[in-house]
Amino acid sequence: MPNATDRFGLVLALLQQQRQATIHALKSGNPSGLAAKLDLDDAIACLQFCEQHGIHAKARITVLPETRTRTPSSEYRILEDHESEDRSIWTELELAGEAIRPTPGTLLLDCGRWVEDTGQ
């Protein structure tokens, strides 16, 4: 199974080379490259984030919709069912002792396994 580094390494190297060329132009007195440098910084940071978290372009993305109940106390919760239909034993996901309560608009990424490249 490929990892994110295999998929982004070449592109990151090219972006970093372009960034260095843009910085060189800025140091030579060409201020018009500042916007390009900032765009390159953002693109590099995005790809590094994807690399770090194993996010790839074919990941399935779900955007949580507005809750059906439109009251301030209605919220989403992430639960583990412990392979049971008995809801009394389900537990809520906690990280660092805090329940995870995503809000409408939250992106859920399912990176799962790498999808084979089909050339499309």
Image (cartoon, rainbow, N blue to C red):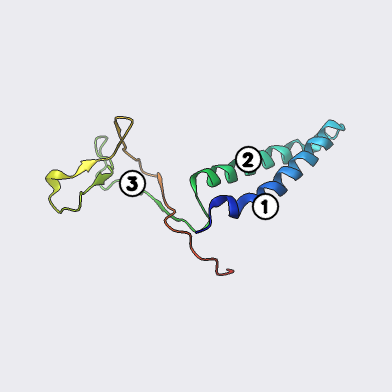
Q: Nearer the viewer, mark 2 or mark 3?
A: 2
Q: Nearer the viewer, mark 1 or mark 3?
A: 1
Q: Are marks 2 and 1 in contact (CB under 8 Å)?
A: no
Q: Nearer the viewer, residue 18 or 112?
A: 112
The answer to which image quadrant residue 95 occupies is top left
Local SS, label 3? loop
Q: Which residue is mark 1?
A: 10
Q: Mark 2 vs mark 1: which is more N-terminal?
A: 1
**What is the spatial separation of the Cα atoms under label 2 and label 3, in whole angstroms?**
29 Å
Task: Identify the residue under disc 3.
Answer: 66
Query: Which three-letter amino acid code belongs to the residue tagged 3?
Result: Glu
Q: Residue furthest front?
A: 1
Residue 11 at x, y percent in the picture: 67, 51
Q: How many marks?
A: 3
Mark 2: give few (<14), some (14-19) or many (20+) Cα within 10 Å.
Answer: few
Q: Real-space Cα distance between discs 2 and 1?
A: 17 Å
* Residue at 14% in and 48% down: 87
- Left or right of 78? Residue 31 is right
Q: Is residue 90 above or below residue 73?
A: below
Residue 42 is tagged as 2
